[in-house]
Amino acid sequence: MSQRGPGPGVLDALSLLTEVTDELVLRSVRDTHDAWADRFGGYPGRAITSAVYAGAGIGLRVAAAGLDRAGAAGLGPRLDGGPRGRFVRSAVNGLIGDSLAVERPRLAITMAVRVDGHDVALTPEDLAAAFPDATGRVVVLHHGLCENESYWEFGRERTGTTYAETLASLGWTPVLLRANTGLTVRENGAALSALLDRLVGAWPVPVDRVALVGHSMGGLVVRAAGAVVSDHPEPWADLVSDVVTLGTPHLGAPIARGIGHGARGLSRLPETAAFGRILDRRSVGVHDLVDGLADDVPALPHARYRLVAATLTERERHPVGHVVGDLLVRPPSAYGRDRRGRELFPGADILHLGRTDHFGLLNHPAVHDALREWLV
């Protein structure tokens, strides 16, 4: 088992935090202050106030540069050394991961197979060491926006087990991934396709069946990987028998659309433009949740699709449940059904879970039962 280098440290995260404090918080306070003052005819001592803001900004930029140099030297504890650091890194990658990949690559996550909090190299030796009980049936689990592989443990206290453990009891070998969810869905789909190609080729035993499970955005990434192989066929695609999506916004998520509208609205006035700028500094991954993936992304031809949706209400057609869904995704989007009755996945199996939310889809008892029926 191996990791790609020492990985980013806490000082790298502090450097980023200091930079964001300067770019968004301090400048937003300054711009909002000046805009409101201008609306009411200005204010005395503006030159002094501007100098204070400028001095604070210089101080923050100097601190950020110093912390960045210390992080590059490998000083301080590693972010991936504990669950809290991994949580922070995954969340930040979801929010601004596209910027991190260009501006702060040490903090950017590269899609990888994960075991015990570490990346696993896709070599026969490393995979054999990481999966000593490997079978020919491989199920790959991809998390959602701002998440990491540990989210598949969410809800264990309710069920006493996890989806990975349930699938292992059925003869599957679960493979958990971690990805930079701030990148575009299609970019992550290409990365997933390449990873699956290498994984199947280096797997310790011959692979005869593959299943893909995605929570939220993870289901979109799985679909995007399928779109890649529709243009450039890969051996792994012919092995996929089942695709399971849990609360995936196949046709978009209203909350992501609302954030976009809010950012544009706030940007129209000088007094609130700074807050619009904060909202608008969201990753392209978040932008992709607005519309989901349309029917130009074909389903894998050999796969059976299983689509799971949730609502806060017991009944799916309850007025509240129909509008808010699981708080993030509404059932029609999770099923890939638009208002005109078109379906992205004709003949798919669907499952509705009442009285639960988006994260309640993780390790839900009804999904455990469904997996035992679907993935036999």
Image (tube, rainbow, N blue to C red):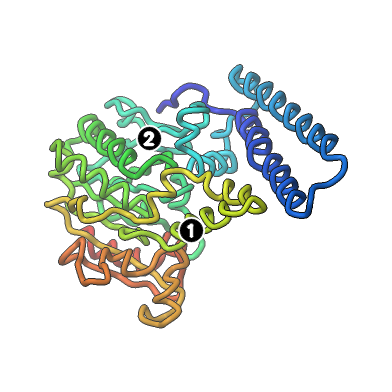
Disc on the earlier residue, 2 or 1: 2
Residue located 68% across and 40% down the image: 27
Which mark's residue is nearer the viewer, 2 or 1?
Answer: 1
Q: Is residue 237 left or right of residue 108?
A: left
Q: What is the three-letter code of the residue carrying label 1?
A: His
Q: Report the residue marked by disc 1.
A: 261
Residue located 64% across and 30% down the image: 15
Q: What is the three-letter code of the residue carrying label 2?
A: Ala
Q: Is residue 270 left or right of residue 320?
A: right
Toward the top, the furthest residue is 73
The percent coordinates of residue 74 (x first, y second) are: 60, 20
Query: Does residue 360 appear in the picture of this structure?
Result: yes
Q: Quadrant of residue 227?
A: top left
Callout 2 secondary element = strand
The percent coordinates of residue 194 (x first, y second) are: 26, 33
Residue located 36% across and 78% down the image: 316
The percent coordinates of residue 217 (x first, y second) are: 38, 52
Tell me the crowding category of disc 2: few under 14, some 14 to 19, or many 20 or more residues within 10 angstroms, Cα based. many
Tell me the crowding category of disc 1: few under 14, some 14 to 19, or many 20 or more residues within 10 angstroms, Cα based. some
The label on residue 3 is: none
Q: Quadrant of residue 265?
A: bottom right
Callout 1 secondary element = helix
Picture quarter with the N terminus? top left
Q: Is residue 352 left or right of residue 274?
A: left
The label on residue 112 is: 2
Pick the residue in front: 22 or 206: 22
Query: Does residue 159 appear in the picture of this structure?
Result: no
Toward the right, the furthest residue is 44
Distance, label 2 to label 1, CA atoms, is: 34 Å
